[in-house]
Image (cartoon, helix red, strand yellow):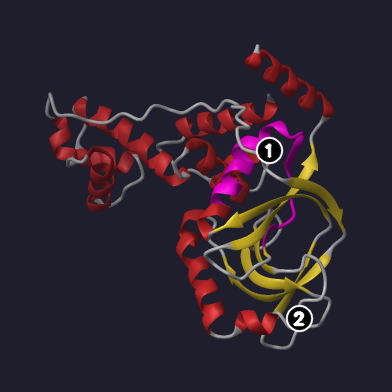
Amino acid sequence: MEWIQQLNTTIDYIEGHLNDEINYEALAKLADCSSFHYQRMFAYMAGVPLSEYIRRRRMTRAAIDLQNGDKVIDVALRYGYSSPTSFNRAFQSVHLIAPSLAKKKGVPLKSFPPIRFQISIKGAEEMKYRIEEKEAFQIVGRSIPLSKNIEENFNVVPKMWEQAASDGTLSTLMTYMNQQPMGVLGVSVCNHLEEWRYYIAVSSDITPLEDFESYQVPASIWAIFEGKGTGESIQELEKRIITEWLPSSGYEYGQAADIEVYLDPDPQNTTYEVWLPVEQKNRDETSLMDSDKTKEMS
């Protein structure tokens, strides 16, 4: 299947550039999606963040080079570490020993081979969803810039929610909400064309006052999934969407924003929806995917 082949092409690219600075945008282009979607998809499917996978592959190769007699400083520079301290820290995080000790015979080391992606059809637990085509709509709220490395955003976004809850932002936003989707929104704008930003907002056609800003969510087809539970449960749902639903759905990532709709404000037992922008896949590719599924089940 072309989608899986594209992901494996990115692995080949990583292998060919372990001695260089690896460009996430180049990887995303090979996967035919945005850098945000690629990094999230990689982490969900590989079970490890992209940056950690690259670090493990580099340290696997570094250990081999050291055992072959290369100097520590040369190996550090080869894999992009200008500081011996940072290389030592990265090496120990993987192998649990200093690079200098890795040169000795009989020392236990770890090896992380290159991964290969393949489709896995699970479907043990249902996922409730609907497909909707929606015209562009305005959201009103506050935003922060996002890093191109999505791991760096994992601490920033929760802190933004905490502040919005404590300073009255959420309650004030509710006075603006007057159109669908009716709920407090977490909106990730992470495409090829715009600065990456995260919004806490509501859907509204009201022109905001100076305290807030507006953003126009473009028209899109949305795959909308229902869920209920804690904040962790929404992450698990998103993982299942990417690893279980999307590969066999006949759709691929669209270019609109990713949206989380919180229908109930209780953080310990909230009702929510995940809105994933999608585009219809090429019919020939979908037919090939169905054929692969039939072979796998036979």
| Outermost residue toward the top in this view | 298
| Quadrant the N terminus occupies | top right
Residue 189 x/y as whole percent: 67, 61
Residue 99 x/y as whole percent: 19, 39
Left or right: 49 as drawn, with respect to 245 = left
Question: Residue at horizontal 29%, vertical 46%?
Answer: 90
**Residue 246 numbered mark, or none:** 1
| Outermost residue toward the bottom in this view | 210
Question: Residue at horizontal 31%, vertical 37%?
Answer: 59
Q: Quadrant of residue 206?
A: bottom right
Assign a secondary structure to mark 1: helix
- Please give the residue where the numbered disc 2 appears in the rendered image: 176
For label 2, count other residues whose C-alpha is less than 10 Å away and answer few (under 14), some (14-19) or many (20+).
some
Residue 156 within the segment the image draws in magenta: no
| Quadrant the C terminus occupies | top right
| Outermost residue toward the front in this view | 269
Instruction: Please provide the residue range marked out in magenta.
Output: 235-261
Give the answer, above or below, for where 254 lies relative to 183.
above
* First of labels 2, 1 by sequence position: 2
In the image, 263 versus 210, the foreground residue is 263
Q: Quadrant of residue 33?
A: top right
Cα separation between marks 2 and 1: 33 Å
Residue 123 x/y as whole percent: 63, 32
Three-letter residue code for mark 2: Tyr
Give the answer, above or below, for where 144 lies relative to 83.
below
Q: Quadrant of residue 78?
A: top left
Residue 44 visible: yes
Left or right: 56 as drawn, with respect to 166 = left
Residue 253 within the segment the image draws in magenta: yes
Three-letter residue code for mark 1: Leu
